[in-house]
Amino acid sequence: APVATVRPVQPQPSPEAQRSPSHPQALAALRGVRKSFGRRLVLDGVDLEAKAGQVTVVLGGSGSGKSTMLRILLGLESYDAGSARLLGHEVGELTRAQSRALMLQIGVLFQFGALFDSMTVNENVGFALRHVRRAPEAEIAERCALNLRRVGLADEGALYPAELSGGMRKRVALARALAHGPKLLFVDEPTTGLDPLSARSINQLILELNRELGVTILCITHDIGAAFELADQMTMLHEGRMIATGPPATLRESAEPALRRFLAAAGRS
């Protein structure tokens, strides 16, 4: 069955505005978003923008609301108030068919990779192309080969996840997230479970792919080193509120007490 066309919720910026490097379009945005689970307030008026072509990093500790924020943008969690927009569309107003069509323009690098253990590397990378887009096998093979080369695993397509190191599994997951050519990539804790060298390698790879492909990236992490290495723009989420936002240098010099404590605990003060 044909995929339903996603109808714009509001007029889009002009082509000139979208092309202007000084006014990049926000591909993902939250405005005054509130979310509670019972009596527990998780997000308290959160504002966020992930602008086209940039790497935007949300830094925060465990329980700060980072994952809930990401789930809201992906349409996996409802929100109580405010606005959550993805590629120009209000997430809460999409039908299931519209949401499915929109997700074809999104890639996700999950925290632990989320590879299918019973599938080879090639089968994992080509999963969405084969089972969601129903792409021809020749196109699937071409895109798998291309993206495995991009992540430095050109010769590992026949292996299974159990035969790979943690860093290699993360690279396969990144190749899978990029295989269908998304406009926007969500990255969930990219360095979790990796040794320092592997973590640095993944960070550098994410930056290279952002620069090479122009894909917009929204990353959530508790890893201060990764945050400062990756970000064009950063924001600190603390107890459900954004307490500091700006380029990395701005956050490094911020006097916000909760941010200073977070940086000091990681030896970054």
Image (cartoon, rainbow, N blue to C red):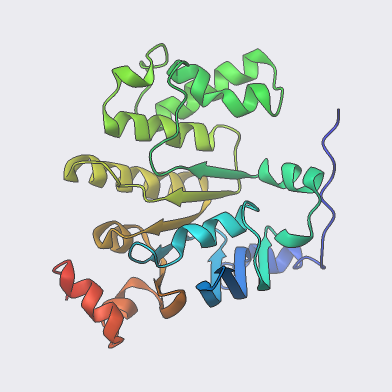
Q: Quadrant of the N terminus?
A: top right
Residue 160 x/y as whole percent: 38, 16
Query: Which residue is at a point 71% across and 59% down the rendered structure image?
Result: 91
Q: On the picture, is 165 further left or further right than 66?
A: left
Q: Is residue 73 left or right of residue 54?
A: right
Does 78 sit above or below residue 156? below
Q: Residue at x 51, y 60 (%)?
A: 68
Let me know if residue 215 appears in the view.
no
Say how many tags the image has.
Answer: 0
In the image, 56: left or right of 221? right
In terms of depth relative to the viewer, which is nearer, 181 or 263?
Answer: 263
Pinpoint residue 183: horizontal percent, then vertical percent.
61, 48
Q: Residue furthest bottom?
A: 255
Q: Percent position (x, y) of residue 173?
A: 43, 33
Which residue is most to the front? Answer: 39
At 45% from the left and 77% from the top, the residue drawn is 242
Please state the horizontal and vertical placement of residue 102, each as a whole percent of the image. Answer: 71, 47
Residue occupying the far top of the picture = 158
Q: Quadrant of the C terminus?
A: bottom left
Seen as rendered, the residue at the extreme left is 267
Identify the residue at image location x=53%, y=48%.
185
Q: Is residue 15 left or right of residue 230?
A: right
- The reply to whether residue 97 is in sight is yes
Which residue is at the front of the view, 34 or 93? 34
Vertical placement of 111 versus 77: above or below? above
